[in-house]
Amino acid sequence: MPTARFAIGNVAVLPRAAVNLRPCGAVFRQLHRRSTSRPLLCSITSELSQQEEDREVPSQGLPPVAGGIVALGKFDALHIGHRELAIQAAKVGPPFLLSFVGMAEVLGWEPRAPIVAKCDRRRVLSSWAPYCNNMIPAEFQVEFSSVRHLTPRQFVEKLAKELGVRGVVAGENYRFGYRAAGDALELVRLCEEYGLGAYIIGSVMDKKQYARNINSSDSKERGQVSSTRVRRALAVGDMRYVSELLGRKHRLILMAKDQEGFTSNNSRVSAPKSCLLNLAPKEGLYEKCSLSIGEDNLVPCKVVIDTKHIHIEMDEVGTGNIVSNQDLRLLCIEFGDSGT
């Protein structure tokens, strides 16, 4: 099978050994990229089942990802490192984020709240379009149980033959295959063998000096931006740091339930934590936030989080009544950079 070759000037790898490789036509050199943020503020609707935009369905019954360039990883936080993968994918073709679902259930992990609410992921990915040649990266999920026992070779074969992808993008620390047997260099070698483009990029590093030593005992921890760092920053309420890691302000989504809804008065809305659809920061007071009410109404507010409730306090008297009058079922809080 002929090897597909592409050239991307900014794609790079940071090899740990003194090896000079040039697979798939990509130049391998150290990459230091400083991420900038162009936040796109959008109101989310009460429609919880947001779908990907319709894309042309590939012929011969192949899945939507066929012919695309897939970024490989765990895309919980959709942080600036994940965005960098999508940027590089978009330089070659239609960008996709390929991730696995059902890992927690299969591996027996404790369930935990996502960093980005499922209904808000489309908005975040849409905000990446200016970085991705005006293309919105699409998500493609594979059941973890179907790939758990695949060897590195079998996994790449699945990408090439079953999914029909044209190329892959991964970070320098990416591991794949059963028991993480394959590394980035193995991915490049196998992709060449199966005629796929392979692009390995250097990690997007955390610029915050004190955070570089977080959990230094973790063998995977080398100072790179990660979903783990986002969770830890939320756990201490450092919203400025969270914004730096995400490349945008953190959004908290609350959905009213039949038994437990929102309570409101003239300038205050409260909701039990059971309404949360994603991970909240630690208990405390958060200034300079915004509340998105419905489609277009964005209201300045401050947020108080206690052990059981989220309290949203607005400056404008009467604003809280909008929630009760419109019987809204979904609220969105965007946090500022100040926190407890």
Image (tube, grey):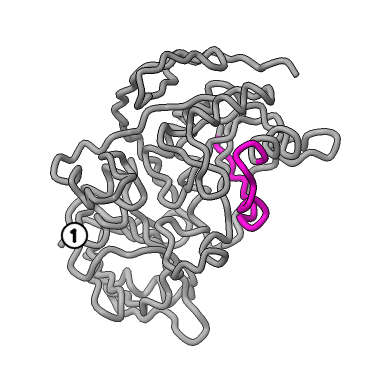
Q: Residues within 10 Å of mark 1 (few under 14, many from 20)?
A: some
Above or below 22: residue 216: below
247, above or below 51, in the image: above
Badge 1 element: strand
Tell me residue 6's x, y (percent): 58, 15
Identify which residue is drawn at 57% across, 62% down: 48
User: Quadrant of residue 188 in the image?
Assistant: top right
Q: Which portion, as a residue range, is magenta?
A: 136-154
Query: Total marks drawn?
Result: 1
Q: Amino acid at mark 1?
A: Glu
Quarter holding the N terminus?
top right
Q: Which residue is mark 1?
A: 287
Q: Residue at x 31, y 46 (%)?
A: 219
Residue at left offset 27%, top offset 63%: 281
- Looking at the picture, does residue 206 appear above or below residue 67? below
Q: Nearer the viewer, residue 9 or 194?
A: 194
Query: As drawn, is 182 to the left or to the right of 54?
Result: left
State the image coordinates of residue 279 (x, y, percent, origin top left): 37, 63
Magenta run includes residue 257? no
Counting from the top left corner in percent of width and height, residue 155 is at 64, 40
Q: Residue furthest right?
A: 60
Q: Quadrant of the C terminus?
A: bottom left
At horizontal 35% and vertical 34% (from top left) the residue drawn is: 38
Residue 84 x/y as whole percent: 42, 32
- Residue 147 within the magenta-colored segment of the rendering: yes
Toward the bottom, the furthest residue is 259
